[in-house]
Image: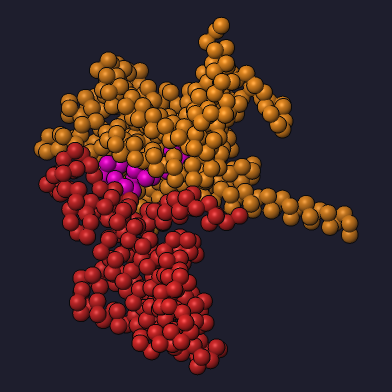
Amino acid sequence: MAEVAEKKEKQKEPLFSKKNKGLMTDPLFDNNPITIQVLGICSALAITAQLKASIVMALAVMFVLAMGNVVISLMRNIIPSKIRIIVQLVIVAALVIIVDLVLKAYAYELSKQLSVFVGLIITNCIIMGRFEAFALGNGPWKSFLDGIGNAAGYGLILIIVGFFRELLGSGTLLGFKVLGDPIEKTGLYALGYENNGFMLLAPMALITVGIIIWIQRSRNQSLIES
Amino acid sequence: MSLKDKLHNLKEQYKGKKMAPAFNAIHTFLYLPNETTHSGSHVRGADDLKRTMNMVIMAMVPCLIWGMFNAGYQHYSAIAGGTPEFVSFFDHLRYFFTLDNLLIGAMKVLPLVIVSYLVGLGIEFLFAVIKKHEVEEGYLVTGMLVPLIVPVDTPLWMLTIAVAFGVVIGKEVFGGTGMNILNPALTIRAFLFFAYPTWMSGDKVWVHDAVNRSGADAISGETMLGMLAQKKELAYGIDEAFFGFIPGSVGETSTLLIILGAAILIFTKIASWRIILSGIVGASVMGLIFNGVIAQGWITEGSKFYALMNLPFWQHLVIGGFAFGITFMATDPVSGAQTTKGKWWYGFLIGFFAVMIRVFNPAYPEGIMLAILLMNVFAPSIDHYVVQGNVNKRLKRLKVKTA
């Protein structure tokens, strides 16, 4: 990283210049990978039934995307463009296997819960999209920031969806029974409240993402396509 | 000055104000508006949207009243340990039309109606004010359909959430009345079904207060389809089912009164008789196929599909919500097919799939809801192919002439 910073200083551009900060903050809202570019929907629907899984998935994608972006960016001048997709896939696959093994070693239950979707990070369109659109044409530091930013934008939506799905679907947050115990009828359940089973099904995740898109576009009318 | 004139004056005063659409909605609901159309065609039929909607509601009122009496009838029958023996329709009415039955019905069914209208119209008004368009009459029918297609013991807060979901996601996001892809009433029911399955199926919800009577002396309050799906002995005859002395969703039990409603709708040309007829044909065809499979001996008595497959095909039309769905919801002019030929296909496939879902998926004892929602989605495609078929036919004719 020090080498990168040195290079930047030579170009007389501060590490967190306005442009570089924009790389990180733009994908959070106005250029969000999920709600604006509509990428990475599959995993957003599949693993958001619980908040914990959403957070872990967001972190996993952040690691893969940031590291992958840096590696691709460093190799960008030596990758023959005809086989670049294969090279990209190899790099993502290697990073995803690291994530998968770490999860299996330190959070086995969670890794079983995420099951195939950790492996499927390889096919997450956001990752290939950022490699193609950004890392192949920019330096490693910028690519790193871009990776962090896009993964954060993806993770933000995942966490919002996961929060509502777990709260309304299971009545818990991160496993804590925040609404009371449904079997012993405490808290809200004493009043006759019941969990909404529909929230645990994938269609409701799609509708939740849809509502987020709706709110975002009605707050910022310039995002609406003509 | 009469009240009507006063309202007209008030309308002028509030023109352009924020709450104007809400005020106008109440005004036009009560009185004929004092203005003519601003643009387009000035030829108007007497059956405007308001009158059409009111006609549909009137066709449903017999079902609602029957549903209220039936709620009490089932409740007291369950307490007594079973329904009185069925001899003939008119003889049975003396058990049915009693004040006690009506009181239970009013206590359980009217709140459903009130909640459905309050929440649904509240959201309609809210959207009208925010989006600055007039309130449309569409919810008048939906609000009446909703209490008729839910179990009598549905908790009111669940209904509130479901109605809010159905009106916002099922209708308003697409642009309000006339733009919705799915039938809003069925969207509401489907939401309830998937969100709170224990309150929408099984043997505890169809009869008022059945939940609290579990135990040794509990009497099964299942619907006929539920009994068939679980291969239990049918507790009701098909004649009882036709007249409606059975447990079920509030307004769908009496096939007789639904036929009356269908007659009103067809006579006033509001519902498409093509959809209703082809729906009945579709269900019969599927039922006959299943009966044939049984007759061939391909499915034996051990199979879990046997009871429902063995049901004579015409009985599929009588039990469950098929009659209600095909009459009041498949014929929704917005979400259904628009072309004449398309209506035949649309209705046929609804009936066909309804019986197929009934038989093959015991988790969904009633298939008509999912069948209509499925065909709602395909209705535009059906119309597209009908129109394209017509275009191609004409093109061919043109070629022959020019050649």
SS majority, magenta: helix
Left or right: A219 as drawn, with respect to A199:
right
Is residue A95 in the magenta section? no
Of all chains in the rendering, the one displayed in orange is: B
Could you tell me if residue B229 is visible in this image?
no
**Residue at the (18%, 56%) spot, across then down:** A176
Is residue B183 in the magenta section? yes
Tell me which corner region of the image, top left, top right, bottom left or bottom right, holds residue A172. Answer: bottom left
> At which x and y percent is residue B35?
65, 21
Give the quarter of the figure containing the C terminus of chain A: bottom right
State whether residue B29 is above or below residue B169: above
Residue interval drawn in magenta: B182-201
Which sits in the foreground, B390 or B224?
B390
**Residue at the (55%, 7%) spot, across then down:** B2
**Residue at the (36%, 41%) spot, across then down:** B162
**Residue at the (15%, 34%) spot, across then down:** B213
